[in-house]
Structure formats: structure tokens, C-alpha cells
Amino acid sequence: MFLRNLCLAAAALLVFEVLSSNVLAGGYRADGRMTYAVMNGYGGLNTNYFTFTIWVDDCKWFIQSTDEKRPDIKPYEDSYDGNYVYALTTFIDKSGKAHPSGIIESNNVPQETSFYAVPIWIALGSSCYFNEITNSMFQPVWHVSDFSIRNKRHSLLGRLVKHDNSPFLPERLSYYNDGKLYFTDRYGNSRIGSYPSPYQNGFLDAEYVCLEFTNVYDIALPQHFTFTRFRPSPGGQSTNEISIMCIYDCIVTNVSIHKEKTEYSPTLIPPVYIDDRRFGVVTPSVTSIQYSATNSWWPAITNPVVARIYKDKALAANLAGSPQPSAPKPWVKTLIWCILSFSTLIFAFLLFKGTQKREP
């Protein structure tokens, strides 16, 4: 009897160690709910609700989020397979026909239109990314007016506090704006402006806070967390005078260590409109190319059709050249303030209309 009990105890210990090693390697799934509130143009809040699931396997992650107010949109899918980040949105028209569109990019943080996936990634899928950062410079994970700066891995100064236990996910994370506005002019050239005084010296752009952790097989995962975006306050006299643009409040309802997901890129149901941004990191660089995918997998950059579209666009850009931008006009500062004033309206539009720029 003693020997039998000893064997059972050893077997239980072995199972526990295997389960723990799987989790420590980064393999887990988490389900939860998210409340998203954005300031509208009248000083109030527009609120929406999501359910989400995230699968993590070492550095790979896959986020599926469902907008409860948008039955005409299938669950959003955002992922990183170790090489590229993906974003897939599928709109359903009144006849029930699906219109999928996707974005693929050479990066390792969420695609810039995936505002709903950002806090989930920070909380539960960002361990590998932040463990590799040694200079406190972090890529912004929100919409930018100049897509090309993501290809350059444009980063902002930040402050990160990580949990002491594996997988060492953030407890608190702050992103600081550098006071510059990155945009493209009418010729498509990258330009850099400045926020109006005093914000040209920088300000707090976004902040993530984990309010509660839970332990699962000796690892620490967030259970309740928030993510807040800020903007300069019109007429502000100090960089501390900032207003809330939007806030996410998320609660994890279930955690599992079963690795039921093996594919970390969204499966395509053709035809799919693709915005391919992988060629922004090669020479000559092309910010994006567009085409229709006719298979269930994402085309490789060596795909003959994809390669031809890239070469044609690169050649056209080279022949056209880059016209010299004209000198800044006096109305530029006024335009900047208009952009700031309407930024929250843009977020509200994204909230209720979906990421329309992905629609084919």
C-alpha cells in the first residue's frame, strides 16, 4: 500500500511539474470581458462591451474579441505568429454575405487599428516583447497618422513595472508622448510637427494598470486591469493638464493551460481583401500594397502576384520621386488643435462603425 501511494504521489508530482512547465513556457488561454468607454463631443461617455479570448504560446499570441453591439461583425482576430502581426475583420452584409479584410505587418505588437485588442495584449500577451526591452523605449500601440513610422519601430519613452513572478507581465505601464506629431503631407511624404505649447515638451499619452493578479500553477496572470488613453486639454497651461480620451476596464473570467490552438495566424475564407505592410521594412520600402487573397492562407512575400504588385508600386514610387514639401503655413497650428479637438470623435466613430478602413 505504501509503495502504491508513493507511486501515485510521484505521478501527481510529475503531472504538476509538466503542467507548470507548460505554463512557465508561456502556454495558456484566458477569457474575459471588456468595457470600453470613449469621451464623446458633448462631454459624456459612449460605452461598449466586448468578450475576449487570448491564447499565448511563448512569444506567440492570438486574440479574438467580440463586439456585443455589432452582430454584423464576426469576432475580430489579431495575432502574432513569431514573424508577422495580423488583423482580420469580417463584416456581414444584410444578405448574410461575409466581407473579410485583413492586415499583415512585419512587427511584433498589435496592428495599429486594433484598438480593442491592445489592453488584452498588454495584460496577457506582452511578456516576450517587454522582456526584450532594455532602454525603456516602447512602440505605441494605437492609431498613428503616418504608418511608415511603425516600420521604423518608432518608440516612445515609457515606465514599466513588471510582476515578480513568471511570466513577468506588466503591473503598471506608462507611455509618454514626445511632443511631436507624425503625419504625411499631401504628397505622401512623412512630416513632423509639434503639439502646441506647453505640450511640445511631452505628456502622459497612455497608462496601463493591473488592479489584481491571480496565481495559476505558480504563475501570475492579471485578473482585473485598465488601460487609459489621454490627450492634451484645450487651453492647458501645464503638461499635467490632460483629459481622458478613452478607458478600457477588463476582467479575466477564466484561465486554462490547455494548448488547444496550434495556428497563430487567422484562417482566411476567400476572397479576402489584404492590406500588406510587410514591404515597409525592405529596400526599396513600400508602406503598403493591396490585393485579394484567394486561398485560406496568407500569401508569402515571395508569392508571384504579391511580388509583382510590390515591384510595380516600388517602381512607380521611384519614377514619381518625392516632391519637395512647401513651407509650413500659418494655419498649421490651427489644424493641429482641430485634430486634437476631434480625436475623441474619431474614437467614437471607430467604436460604433468598426474599423471601416479594413472593409473591402
Image (spheres, rainbow, N blue to C red):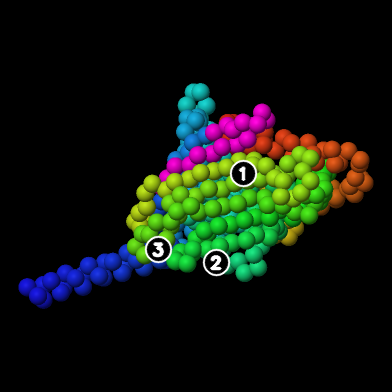
Tag 1 or tag 3, which sits nearer the N-term?
A: 1
At horizontal 9% and vertical 75% (from top left) the residue drawn is 2
Q: Please state which amino acid type lies under the numbered disc 3.
A: Ile
Query: Would you call the spot at circle 2 few (<14 residues within 10 Å), some (14-19), or many (20 or more)?
Result: few
At horizontal 82% and vertical 38% (from top left) the residue drawn is 335
Q: Can residue 299 be seen from the camera position used here? A: no
State the residue lying farthest toward the bottom.
Answer: 3
Callout 2 secondary element = helix
**Residue designated by label 1:** 113
Left-right relation of 6 to 235:
left
Q: Please state which amino acid type lies under the numbered disc 2.
A: Asn
Report x, y in % for residue 137: 66, 62
Residue range of the region highlighted in magenta in the rendering: 31-47
Q: CA distance from mark 2 to mark 3?
A: 16 Å
Left-right relation of 239 to 21:
right
**Residue designated by label 2:** 131
Q: Nearer the viewer, residue 13 or 208?
A: 208
Q: CA distance from mark 3 to mark 1?
A: 31 Å
**Residue designated by label 3:** 219
Report x, y in % for residue 127: 51, 62
Q: Nearer the viewer, residue 35 or 282?
A: 35
In the figure, 16 relative to 3: above or below? above
Query: Would you call the spot at circle 3 few (<14 residues within 10 Å), some (14-19), or many (20 or more)?
Result: some
Left-right relation of 119 to 312:
left
Tag 3 or tag 2, which sits nearer the N-term?
A: 2
